[in-house]
Image (cartoon, grey):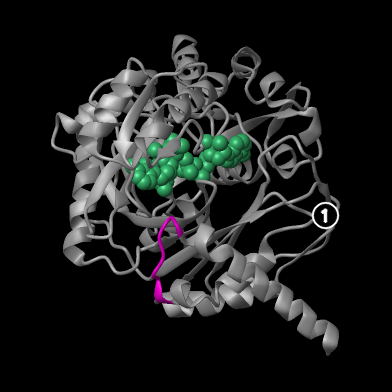
Amino acid sequence: MIISGLIIIVEFEVIMFKRILVANRGEIALRIIRCAREMDIETVIVYSTADKESLPVMGANYSVCIGPNSPKDSYLNQDAIIETAIKMECDAIHPGYGFLSENAEFAKKCEENNITFIGPSSELISKMGDKQEARKLMMNNGVRVVPGSREIIKDVDEALEIAEEIGYPVLIKASAGGGGRGMRKVFEKEELPKLFEMAKAEAKAAFANDDMYIEKLIINPRHIEVQILADKHENVIALGERDCSIQKNNQKMLEESPACGLSDEKRKEISDMAILAGKVSGYNSVGTCEFVLDKDDNFYFIEMNTRIQVEHPVTEEVSNVDLIRQQIRVAAGLKLDITNEDVSICGHAIEFRIIAKTPGVIKNLHLPGGFGVRVETHLYNGYEITPFYDPMIAKVIVKGKNRLEVIRRLRRVLEEIVIDGIETNIVFLHQLTFHPDFLKGNYDTGFYEKESKKILSWINESKNMKKEA
Ligand code: ADP
Ligand code: ADP
Ligand code: MG
């Protein structure tokens, strides 16, 4: 192609998808639409009536309303989504995260209708989604898991027996669990029967499956996860780790890569363990291996998430790999164009999640920008936050040469951002950046519970100071 005397070589990548359906909403739907556009793939967004005026609906090539507000009638309505994909002649469906992204039945329906599910095969989703099965597979193949049960627990008596064997405290977990639900910490034998039944009932209500297992409870571990990327040709690579230990009620609040204070050997060990987990499961998409790291730097596999993760941009920023693009490529059957030797982690990145604490209409929106700042959001002035969906409304990812530079940038970004019309967690996040342990990178999954009161009191103090001034 010759443009004004310049010769531009355009590299075309042969992607077998012409049009994909995006079965999600919010920032992740927008992220997928943007990526598809760069790959010359058309998009069809399905949406609920509540999301009619949303950026993904405006940004996609085609949009189809598939139902009312309630997720079960729209974003979880498998048949309506498949029918739309067929009618709109889509080759593939991207499920994003949440909703149907880890639903093996939905992936199977896609396969049966000759539509590519952009994720692993339905077989892999069910294998990994059964957390006890996944544990067993890992145990049998040299991946270190948290000490605990080897099979699904039949009843309370068996639970008591196993807990005695591994020693208290223990963690009762639902095999079909997710989002931190169906779990109970047990510190003493006497409380086990009641907590076991409670966890079981919660699992039955949330996942229609009350298979339970038990793990040793690691006291305030760090949550370290490794991003893996695999294709349908048995290639598996790891793209570094993320520390997601700052969690409120098991929900991540802030994530960073690389994790602080890990030795190069430990980092490599965890990464190799994640690659092994990918290999032994025959993994073939993007995925995340989650580990807990105890006080003595021992790490244990806890689960594999078979989807793109909320916090994937942290890894993108330090590895310079577009994970959504790679996810689409491997789903189309292409071989990975990167090897483990090509992976180079450069600098530091931190993501924080902005949560809407109330519904409302967004006013005076000012999103931060500048060097090293990336914002993933579907917000605009006049956009209405409804109470029907996940309250996460934006992710801000800050990147820099080193962690100190990133924290300074993080502070400046949190001072700059304006979101009026609703309540958010921005002030909390800003105060968090002054916490000495956060500054030192010295935090674990117990941090929020232990320190949040102190951080909240700083907020009140500074409010009072402003009033006095
Ligand atoms: P995890 O902590 O298990 O890695 P993430 O924090 O990555 O999970 O977020 C994914 C989870 O958050 C989903 O399983 C779901 O419960 C919830 N979630 C996130 N985003 C959405 C969304 N757009 N719609 C619905 N649920 C969502
Ligand atoms: P979910 O499927 O709900 O994400 P996980 O098994 O990933 O469940 O556990 C959720 C969180 O609970 C982890 O991020 C970690 O902080 C904590 N956790 C999980 N297993 C253990 C354990 N054995 N000991 C201590 N904490 C744990
Ligand atoms: Mg998890």
Position of 433 with respect to 280 (left or right) is right
Position of 335 with respect to 287 (left or right) is left
Residue that sits furthest to the top in the current view: 112
* Quadrant in which the C terminus appears: bottom right
Residue 280, position in %: x, y?
19, 31
Q: Looking at the image, which is closer to me, 324 or 90? A: 324
Task: Ligand 1: give its quadrant.
Answer: top right
Residue 184, image quadrant: top left
Q: Is residue 230 visible?
A: no
Residue that sits furthest to the bottom in the current view: 469
Q: Looking at the image, which is closer to me, 353 or 296? A: 296
Residue 402, position in %: x, y?
39, 76
Q: Which residue is mark 1?
A: 362
Position of 224 with respect to 361 (left or right) is left
Q: Looking at the image, which is closer to me, 258 or 293? A: 293
Q: Is residue 442 magenta?
A: yes
Residue 232, position in %: x, y?
28, 29
Number of labelled discs?
Answer: 1
Residue 391, position in %: x, y?
68, 45
* Label 1: which secondary element: loop
Q: Main secondary structure of the magenta part?
A: loop
Q: Which residue does the image show at 70% across and 23% down from the upper left?
A: 74
Mark 1 C-beta to ligand 1 under 8 Å: no
Q: Is residue 373 visible?
A: yes
Range drawn in magenta: 440-446
Q: Is residue 44 above or below residue 391?
A: above
Q: Is residue 384 above or below residue 108?
A: below
Q: Which residue does the image show at 66% across and 72% down from the upper left?
A: 457
